[in-house]
Image: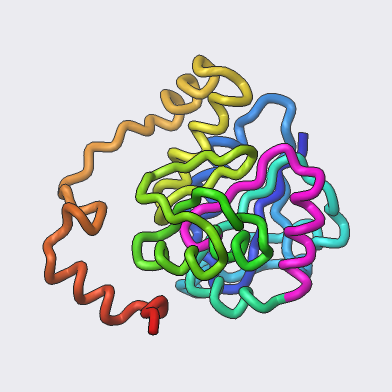
Amino acid sequence: MQIAIVLFDRFTALDAVGPYETLGRLPDARTVFVAERTGPVRTDTGNLALTADRTFAELPDPDIVIVPGGPGQTPQMENAVLLDWLRAADATSTWTTSVCTGSLLLAAAGLLRGRRATSHWLALDVLKEFGAEPAQERVVFDGKYVTAAGVSSGIDMGLTLLGRIAGDEHAQAVQLLTEYDPQPPYDAGSPHKAPAHLVEEFRSKSRFILS
């Protein structure tokens, strides 16, 4: 089984690495970082790069597609090379997935029309523009499409899908070995829990402000 994790300039690191560390532990699977061109691809901070070992053209039919989000997602919304590859890969994939605003790329490729999906809370309503039904859930399954909310939820998505494919015990083993036992120091991980002034501050600065 091949797992393709899409990279593009200014993606968010944890969007890709979270599923890599969880779903990437699927037995007898090979995880490949794929991009328009091979070589290092910089994250949104510019301080870290992951290496794309294969181009889209070299990996036309992965079994699982994982699309991260990040600030670099916006210019990719009109990247025909990426969108065409997503459509082609989706035609034969077993699972097509995303983390954070990666779901907007799936939506732009026309893959989420009429489907329930989630995204980062700042971008959730944008899904409506592409005919998707926004869902305020951490991980959303709709057929073979699996979308995760913001950044850290990619870990949850990876574990959940891992359990679906390899069984609960294998997913539990991966959770144990990665010691994924969240005990955050603050209860501010969603706009429903965070201080209202912080929510409004980030809404006002968001690149997803709708007209």
Asked if 61 appears above or below 74 in the picture, the reply is: above
Q: Is residue 77 left or right of residue 28?
A: left
Tell me where residue 185 appears, x and y as whole percent.
16, 46
How did the renderer colour the structure? rainbow
Q: Quadrant of residue 192?
A: bottom left
Asked if 105 appears above or below 60 in the picture, the reply is: below
Tell me where residue 210 appears, x and y as whole percent.
39, 79
Asked if 138 appears above or below 23 in the picture, the reply is: below
Q: Which residue is painted at 45% across and 53% down in the image?
A: 118
200 and 20: which one is in front? 200
Tell me where residue 108 appears, x and y as whole percent.
62, 68
Q: Which residue is painted at 67% across and 67% down in the image?
A: 40
List the single residue furthest toward the top. 169
Q: Quadrant of residue 31?
A: top right
107 and 65: which one is in front? 107
Q: Which residue is painted at 87% across and 57% down in the image?
A: 58
Q: Is residue 93 left or right of residue 175?
A: right
208 and 132: which one is in front? 132
Q: Is residue 126 left or right of residue 7?
A: left
Q: Which residue is painted at 50% across and 18% down in the image?
A: 168
58 and 117: which one is in front? 117
Asked if 190 appears above or below 174 in the picture, the reply is: below
List the single residue furthest toward the bottom. 211
The residue segment tinted magenta is: 80-102
**Quadrant placement of the N terminus:** top right
Q: Quadrant of residue 102?
A: bottom right
**Quadrant placement of the C terminus:** bottom left
